Amino acid sequence: MSNVLKRNRAVSNSEYITKARAIREEITSLVMNEKIVPKRYRYVYSIPMIDICRKLDQNATTYYNCMGTDDEFFNLYNRKIEALRNMYDCCDYLLHELLSLRNRFYIKISAREKVVGLLIDEQELIDELIETENEKHTNFIIHNSK
């Protein structure tokens, strides 16, 4: 248990990876449950959603591995922004797939709320990271143009 008050805690540098892995675990357990998604629909709903979760996790790891300073040719910045946009797209695809799944099958509200909450939190983190990367990049360009 942390001694820091909850309101004074900052977001961890790797919070997006933790959330991406939590999303992967929650969605996998949700879509592989036969009471929610029958076996005959696994190839239509479950497998594609799990693949999207893998891509989300891969892009989070890619962004984490790109942690460094900008270079003159903007390669690092472009890789970071591409990974973040891919992460955002994965979250968006998963939300659409959950909507499609909800329209086809009955899913308890508590299970949906948990997954959707994680996805929305992840998208908010990604938005903040994109803003931060754009600010860093702008400062880098201003500093090196002088």
Image (spheres, helix red, strand yellow):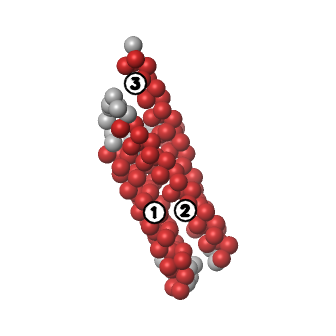
What label sits on residue 53 in the rendered view?
A: 1
Q: State which quadrant residue 24 falls in.
A: bottom left
What label sits on residue 140 in the rendered view?
A: 3
Q: Is residue 106 above or below residue 24?
A: below
At 50% across and 74% down in the image, what residue appears? 46
What label sits on residue 44 in the rendered view?
A: none
Q: Position of residue 123 (x, y in %)?
A: 54, 49
Determine contact: label 1, label 2, CB under 8 Å.
yes
**144 and 129: which is toward the camera:** 144
Q: Amino acid at mark 2?
A: Leu
- Earlier residue among tags 1 and 3: 1
Task: Tell us which disc is closer to us: 1 or 3.
Answer: 3
Q: Amino acid at mark 1?
A: Cys
Q: Is residue 133 left or right of residue 71?
A: right
Determine contact: label 2, label 3, CB under 8 Å.
no
Q: Is residue 104 left or right of residue 35?
A: right
- Earlier residue among tags 1 and 2: 1
Within 10 Å of the Cα at label 1, are there few (<14), some (14-19), or many (20+) other Cα atoms? many
Residue 133 visible in image = yes
Within 10 Å of the Cα at label 2, are there few (<14), some (14-19), or many (20+) other Cα atoms? many
Q: Amino acid at mark 3?
A: Phe
Q: Which residue is mark 2?
A: 94
Determine contact: label 1, label 3, CB under 8 Å.
no
Mark 3 residue element: helix
At 47% across and 63% down in the image, what residue appears? 52
Within 10 Å of the Cα at label 3, are there few (<14), some (14-19), or many (20+) other Cα atoms? some
Q: Quadrant of the C terminus?
A: top left
Calculate the distance from the C-alpha at mark 2 to the C-alpha at mark 3. 34 Å
Q: Position of residue 140 (x, y in %)?
A: 40, 24
Q: Position of residue 96 (x, y in %)?
A: 61, 63
Q: Position of residue 93 (x, y in %)?
A: 56, 60
